[in-house]
Image (cartoon, rainbow, N blue to C red):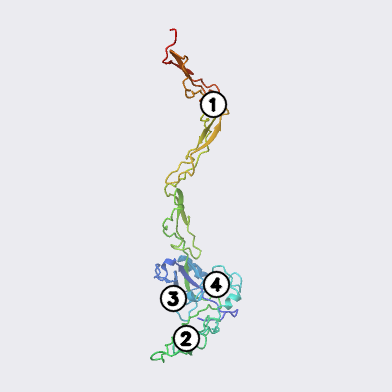
């Protein structure tokens, strides 16, 4: 029922409702005696009550006075309560301070917010751009649109006057093969209206009652575990749940506990690439005199390759020359034998010799002399008899 307030503004009716979770949206309310709208359950009480009595009645039924502050909820409750010219409480009172209206949820009602509930007539936006021609040859049509949103009609205000779409012909300048007189059909749009109801000017009037139930939050089921945070070795994975079964509403308690659970996970051994140890000490020189070599080593154990990890890159041994600073002993060696000497006599039988020297090489630096004789002797026969013998 529409009724003017003493302040000159329009006010919404007081209602009672039960809030349910989003999971019941579009379904029948699971609580007997309540109607569901967008996941919220509402109940209308047919008994006349004052504001204080209305609060007590809602509390006894497990609920609170409703605070319907938008068109959709208001329209639903209007129909739920049977429509018609009935007064209803909404959660609004000036019992504490005369003339200062406060919603059940604590929000102070200002004249600015009240003005918004007055009727607003719709206004057209400017026309949009013309669409492309409806045909690619011959003569067709093109359209442009505007919307009744400047402003949109509210609180029973009038719809915009006129058409939301304008049509005109368009000529492509191209001849069509065959029939070129085709013109496409146009479409029509429909819009509905919303019923409005307001509270009367007195807070002590005997009014019909509508109540709201408080809902404590409940956890959804746990989701699946996430992938392990690592591809090898030890990591973590988590799973989540939401406080939506049901969601807390109208002062209901939030869910107790954590929305996330974490546990350790093992993705298997990780590959380990090999690493060299530091170089070992150089070995002794390979010789005790003259120039030789010495080496040093390292091993691929820092760490050793594991689980398919790469071997160490480079050599495991390093070599360099070393000089003892000492000349090496040289043992003597015989030269070849010289030619045999002439026979020691000119008649009869004598001897002849040949020599060699210990110079191939000569002994040095304490090397040993050649072994054996430096001269060899043999007999020689001249073939001539000596006189007088």
- At mark 3, the secondary structure is helix
Q: Is residue 372 visible in the rendered structure shown here?
A: no
Q: Earlier in the sequence, mark 2 or mark 1?
A: 2
In the displayed structure, 288 sits above or below 16; it is above
Q: Which residue shows up at 44% across the image and 52% down it?
A: 231
**Of residues 378 and 200, the one drawn nearer to the viewer in this rendering:** 378
Give the x, y percent position of residue 54.
50, 70
- At mark 4, the secondary structure is strand
CA gap, disc 3 and disc 2: 48 Å
CA gap, disc 3 and disc 4: 20 Å
Closer to the camera: disc 1 or disc 3?
A: 1
User: Which residue is denoted by mark 2 in the rendering?
Assistant: 133
Labelled pair 1, 3 in contact (Cβ < 8 Å) = no
Residue positioned most to the front: 387
Dot 1 crowding, Cα within 10 Å, few <14, some 14–19, many 20+: some
Give the x, y percent position of residue 81.
45, 76
Side of 147 where 33 appears, left or right:
left
CA gap, disc 2 and disc 4: 55 Å
Labelled pair 2, 1 in contact (Cβ < 8 Å) = no
User: Which residue is denoted by mark 1 in the rendering?
Assistant: 328
Q: Earlier in the sequence, mark 2 or mark 4?
A: 4
Side of 138 where 290 appears, left or right:
right
Closer to the camera: disc 2 or disc 1?
A: 1
Q: Which mark identifies residue 302?
A: none
**Of residues 315 and 120, the one drawn nearer to the viewer in this rendering:** 315
Closer to the camera: disc 4 or disc 1?
A: 1
User: Which residue is denoted by mark 4 in the rendering?
Assistant: 92
User: Which residue is denoted by mark 3 in the rendering?
Assistant: 80
Residue positioned most to the top: 388
């Amino acid at each position: 029922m529409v009724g003017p307030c003493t302040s000159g503004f329009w006010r919404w009716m007081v209602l009672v409702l039960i809030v349910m979770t989003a999971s019941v949206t579009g379904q029948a309310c699971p609580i007997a005696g309540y109607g569901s709208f967008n996941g919220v359950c509402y109940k209308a009480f047919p008994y006349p009550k004052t504001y204080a009595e209305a609060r007590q009645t809602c509390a006894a039924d497990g609920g609170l006075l409703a605070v319907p502050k938008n068109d959709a909820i208001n329209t639903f409750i209007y129909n739920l309560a049977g429509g018609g010219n009935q007064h209803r409480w909404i959660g609004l009172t000036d019992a504490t301070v005369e003339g200062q209206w406060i919603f059940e949820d604590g929000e102070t009602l200002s004249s600015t917010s009240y003005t918004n509930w007055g009727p607003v007539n719709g206004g057209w936006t400017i026309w949009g751009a013309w669409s492309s021609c409806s045909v690619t040859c011959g003569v067709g049509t093109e359209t442009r649109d505007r919307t009744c949103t400047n402003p949109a009609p509210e609180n029973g205000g009038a719809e915009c006057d006129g058409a939301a779409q304008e049509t005109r012909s368009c000529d492509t300048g191209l001849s069509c093969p065959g029939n070129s007189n085709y013109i496409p059909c146009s479409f029509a749009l429909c819009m509905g209206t919303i019923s409005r109801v307001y509270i009367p000017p007195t807070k002590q009037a005997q009014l019909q009652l509508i109540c709201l139930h408080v809902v404590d939050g409940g956890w959804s089921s746990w989701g699946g575990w996430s992938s392990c945070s690592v591809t090898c070795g030890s990591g973590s994975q988590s799973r989540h749940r939401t406080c939506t079964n049901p969601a807390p509403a109208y002062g209901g308690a939030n869910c107790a506990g954590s929305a996330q659970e974490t546990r350790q996970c093992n993705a298997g051994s990780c590959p380990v690439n090999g690493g060299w140890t530091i170089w070992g000490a150089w070995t002794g020189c390979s010789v005790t005199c003259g120039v030789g070599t010495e080496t040093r080593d390292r091993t691929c154990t820092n760490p050793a390759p594991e689980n398919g990890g790469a071997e160490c890159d480079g050599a495991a041994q390093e070599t360099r020359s070393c000089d003892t600073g000492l000349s090496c002993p040289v043992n003597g060696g015989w030269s070849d034998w010289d030619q045999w000497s002439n026979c020691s006599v000119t008649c009869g039988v004598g001897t002849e010799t040949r020599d060699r020297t210990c110079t191939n090489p000569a002994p040095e630096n304490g090397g040993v002399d050649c072994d054996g004789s430096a001269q060899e002797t043999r007999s020689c026969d001249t073939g001539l008899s000596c006189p007088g013998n």
